[in-house]
Amino acid sequence: MTPQEIQKIEPALQGKYYGGFYTPSDSTGDIHKFTRGLAAACLRKGAAFVHDVNVENVETAGGRLSVTWASERHAEPQRTAMAFDKLVICAGVESRRLAGLLGDRVNIYPVKGYSITANLETRESQAASPQVSLLDEAAKIVTSRLGQDRFRVAGTAEFNGFNRDIRADRIQPLTDWVRCNFPGIDTSKIVPWAGLRPMMPNMMPRVSAGRVPGVFYNTGHGHLGWTLSAATSQIVARLVDASAFANASA
Ligand SMILES: Cc1cc2nc3c(=O)[nH]c(=O)nc-3n(C[C@H](O)[C@H](O)[C@H](O)COP(=O)(O)OP(=O)(O)OC[C@H]3O[C@@H](n4cnc5c(N)ncnc54)[C@H](O)[C@@H]3O)c2cc1C
């Protein structure tokens, strides 16, 4: 795209640009809304969820898979152990530890990222905020417009183990980027966030069967977990189905 075309596609974008790429099929969404909606759809299909627990152990016992978790709601942890036929490990940066308990090496490491969400409370802020999702290649910053009144800006790759602190010196560059590129947005009310991307060294997710029969992995999606999730779930579902078929015909 030429600078003129960029201006036509996203008039809110300020600043001087030499050129850009435009992907009409690109889209954005509210991940919180999506996952809550997906969970509700799973419940309608008969799934059961166990929330606010910490999976402490996974082991094979008597030819079945045993999972032990502790409730996080009680002062004294209350443990539950349950046996399963099959298990899909998708525990983000914790997948490595769980895989280790099952004799698999899943070399996931945490890469911390940060985002800010600007609440667009005035008409001026809403008009000054872009509708098209943007990727600033040089600054390594991506943006999403979430409905009429929120604008999210994300970036940064920090190597700091499992630390989840939200550092002011990481948030400031994101705010400065907004102020520089979209000076009409009021940044006095931003919501900062930090999360750990479950990253594999080759940046490809691990979607495969494990060493122990009945164990599968769907994890390590790094910086593109939502983007890839539907496709990799389909792949792992096929693997699980195929193993059920193999067991039935054995
Ligand atoms: C700033 C930032 C911006 C991003 N932007 C995008 C984007 O625009 N598009 C995109 O596609 N991706 C994006 N990502 C990446 C995306 O967030 C991840 O790839 C995705 O969240 C990975 O999903 P997951 O379910 O595999 O792991 P997680 O989201 O980490 O979920 C793992 C879950 O397992 C639970 N868990 C772990 N261990 C245990 C245990 N022992 N017991 C019980 N529960 C456990 C955790 O509590 C958590 O709920 C971004 C990430 C960051 C940090």
Image (spheres, grey):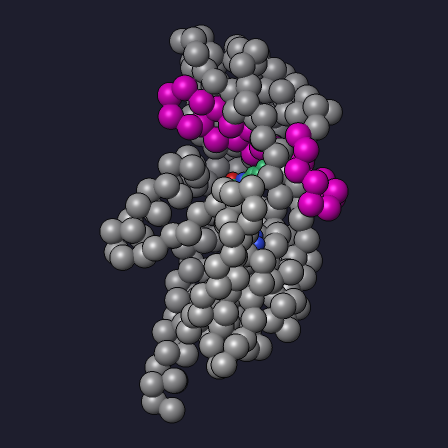
Query: What percent of the width, then of the height, locates residue 216?
Result: 50, 69
Count numbered badges in the picture.
Answer: 0
Q: Answer with the quarter of the image where residue 159 lies.
A: top right
Q: Is residue 60 visible?
A: yes
Q: Is residue 232 above or below residue 148?
A: below
Left or right: where does residue 192 sit relative to residue 50? Answer: right
Residue 157, magenta (yes or no): yes
Query: What percent of the width, then of the height, locates residue 134?
Result: 52, 32
Tell which of 247 and 29 is nearer to you.
247
Query: What percent of the width, then of the height, locates residue 238?
Result: 39, 70
Left or right: where does residue 101 sit relative to residue 243? Answer: right
Residue 48, magenta (yes or no): no
Left or right: where does residue 210 sit relative to residue 35? Answer: right
Left or right: where does residue 44 sit relative to residue 67? Answer: left
In the image, what residue occupies the spot 74% across and 42% down?
160
Q: Is residue 155 visible?
A: no
Q: Magenta residues? A: 139-166
In the image, what residue occupies the spot 44% across and 70% down?
83
Q: Which residue is the extreme one toward the front?
A: 76
In the image, what residue occupies the spot 73% across and 25% down?
169
- Quarter of the image that includes the C terminus: bottom left
In the image, what residue occupies the spot 48% across and 81% down?
63
